[in-house]
Amino acid sequence: MIPREITSKLSDLSLKFPITTITGPRQSGKSTLLKNQFPDYSYVSLENPDIREFAKTDPHGFLATYPSHAIFDEVQRVPELFSYLQTHVDEIDEPGMYLLAGSQNFQLMQGISQSLAGRTALLKLLPFSRKELHNASILPETIDEQMFKGFYPRLYDRNISPTDYYPAYIQTYVERDVRDILKVSDLNKFIKFIKLCAGRIGQILNLTSLANEVGISSTTADGWLSVLEASYICYRLEPNFNNFNKRVIKSPKLYFYDTGLACSLLGLTSTAQIEIFYLRGAIFENLVINQFVKDYYNKGIKPDLSFWRDSQGNEVDLIDTIGLDMHAYEIKSSATFNRDFFKGLVKWGKLSNTPAERLNVIYTGKENLTTSSGKVLSFEKLL
């Protein structure tokens, strides 16, 4: 098993809370992580129809069977169980009683907010990080390979080709999760919607335009996008306006939690195609931002990430707010440094009164550089 960075945080929280809940996309490694880290716990999958029926129809008997030290996987499949869990853990009130895992964040968080608030720690496990693969000596050699292959564990554990893995993943996701949550009658429309979202990576989100292309209402498009977010397919990066300038963009940008999945949705079938693909810069930007997202979640921290763009086209791709300090990043897929890369950063730095040492360009070149405008960081070294 490839060691996961989230392990130490998971161990720590399980010693403090009666329940620890870990969410994330399907096949991100949640079950494997929990079973390996807690081998003495009973593992119970609520995907199993018989087990699920037992938990639904006889929750008291179910919890009597598993009174403590149990892993309940895909727990959102039995939302009725949450209130019984609340009563049970309140009676015993010991740390480490249960570990819950789920891949549908919408249903899972509903149950937690209604019944388990204050009783469970929450963690998010995404597919492998670059650092995890690097430490295991299996990180794909080139950035284009990393973008194309993506980071889902099964690709590396079973040596599955991305062209075999992702179409099946999407089909299964749509037929199981989407059908369950949305009751969509025309699944082909929903698949078209996902593909069009992939074509908008790194762009300002225009829901009306997206809805018109699919042939649905803006309200439906917003609902479908919320489901994609809740099941960890994509996410919105919100703008940072902070009153630096009234003429700023206030709509979010759209990114995918895994670039390999996005590449598959875009119809790419080889690494060579990425090298000349018109969205290569946007996919690289997505790859870089995902690294920030994973680094935070693996530490059990909710990231405070945003972007900035004004009406004149000045832009900063990523702003990482740490306490009272903001660190800004311009992301370029070029391997050659150009001083113009700092244009938007310098503009924003003056508006926000941010010093040059917190202004950064991330590029695909080999060397880290220090300039009078800020730092230039090699993505290959940014682990």
Image (tube, rainbow, N blue to C red):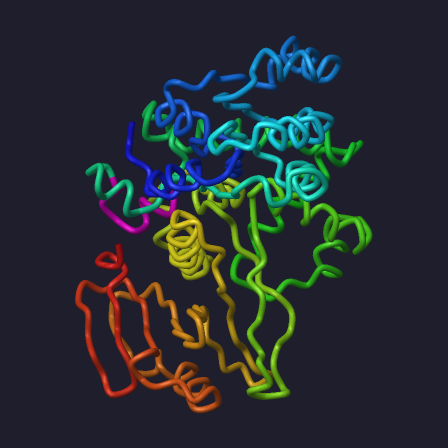
Please tell me which residue lies in front, 83 or 186.
Answer: 83
Residue drawn at (53%, 17%) of the image: 44
The quadrant of the picture occupied by the N terminus is top left
Residue 106: image location, x then y, percent: 67, 41
Residue 48: image location, x then y, percent: 60, 13
Residue 26: image location, x then y, percent: 52, 32
Residue drawn at (46%, 84%) of the image: 348
Above or below residue 205? Residue 155 is: above
Above or below residue 100? Residue 378 is: below
Q: Was residue 157 drawn as part of the magenta stretch in this picture?
A: no
User: Does 193 sit left or right of 133 as displayed?
Assistant: right
User: Does 199 sit left or right of 59 as displayed?
Assistant: left
Above or below residue 134? Residue 69 is: above
Picture quadrant where residue 247 is located:
bottom right
Picture quadrant where residue 119 is located:
top right
Q: Is residue 277 visible?
A: no
The stretch in magenta equals 139-150
Above or below residue 203? Residue 95 is: above
